[in-house]
Image (tube, rainbow, N blue to C red):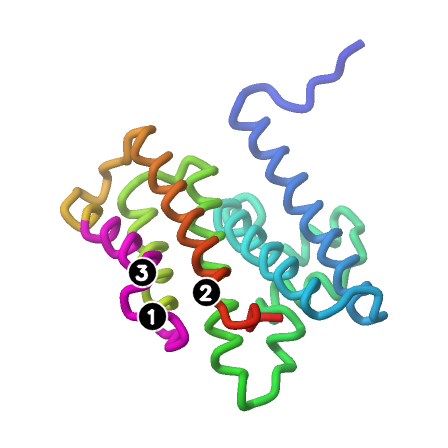
Amino acid sequence: MEVKLWNDKSERETYENFAEIYAITKTTEKLEKAYIRDIISSSTYEPECQKLIAHFKTLASALKDTIPSIERFADTYKMDCPAALYRLVTSGVPATVEHRRVSTEGTAAFVAECVQNFITAMDSLKLNMVAVDQLHPLLTDLSLSLNKLSILPVDFEGKMKVSQWILMLSKMEAADELKEEQARQLHFDLESSYNLFMAALPNRSIG
């Protein structure tokens, strides 16, 4: 006999998001332990941790009404992931950024912020968050974080693409939504800009 876990598409998405939060938290716990035990290098750990943090923040924001407390969620499902909860909820940045020397801390933190803003914006599109009042703040945060990095050239293509989208959204009403082809183009522009951004970092300065 087949047992249904959900009654409609909305419930199905909720269960899938729960599973995603669970998987991200468990993966982060394993990553933290691997880094602490020197099983992986900082150059491998940091970008992977940044991606997990960004994915987590996007999902946690989308599920804030369903999961008001991640700590309670972890306790309910007996996850036992203290290192992950600290990294994802309390710290919000990889251990390597947290422990960076003072002389490089600013740039490292700004790079981490840019990476997280890129991934948050791309994840939001994947979650079909295509309204102007949903996208405009995310792209504005991304633009501000990119402008904090002096290591990027003034005419960096990623900055210009993001600015163009912000300008376009500014001319629309808050409740307006991007059409499917527009959302697809925005995701493509963000992804290509992210790749250009990573390539522009001197010696992958986040590693």
Q: Is residue 95 left or right of residue 166?
A: right
**Quarter of the rendering containing residue 52:** bottom right
Q: Which residues are magenta?
A: 147-167
Residue 182 vs residue 14, the one in the foreground:
182
**Quarter of the rendering containing residue 178:** top left
**Of labels 3 and 2, the one closer to you:** 2
- Mark 3 = which residue? 159
- Mark 2 = which residue? 200
Q: Which mark is residue 20?
A: none
- Mark 1 = which residue? 153
Residue 144 position within the rendered picture, expressed as x and y whole percent measured from the top left: 33, 67
Q: CA distance from mark 1 to mark 3?
A: 9 Å
What residue is at 22 percent from the left and 47 percent from the top? 169
What residue is at 36 percent from the left and 74 percent from the top? 148
Identify which amino acid the numbered label 2 is placed on: Ala
Residue 202 position within the rendered picture, expressed as x and y whole percent measured from the top left: 51, 72
Identify which amino acid the numbered label 3 is placed on: Lys
Q: Are marks 2 and 1 in contact (CB under 8 Å)?
A: yes
Determine the main secondary structure of the stretch shown in magenta.
Answer: helix
Which sits earlier in the primary sequence, circle 1 or circle 3?
1
Identify which amino acid the numbered label 1 is placed on: Pro
What residue is at 40 percent from the left and 53 percent from the top? 193
The residue positioned farthest toward the left in the image shown: 171
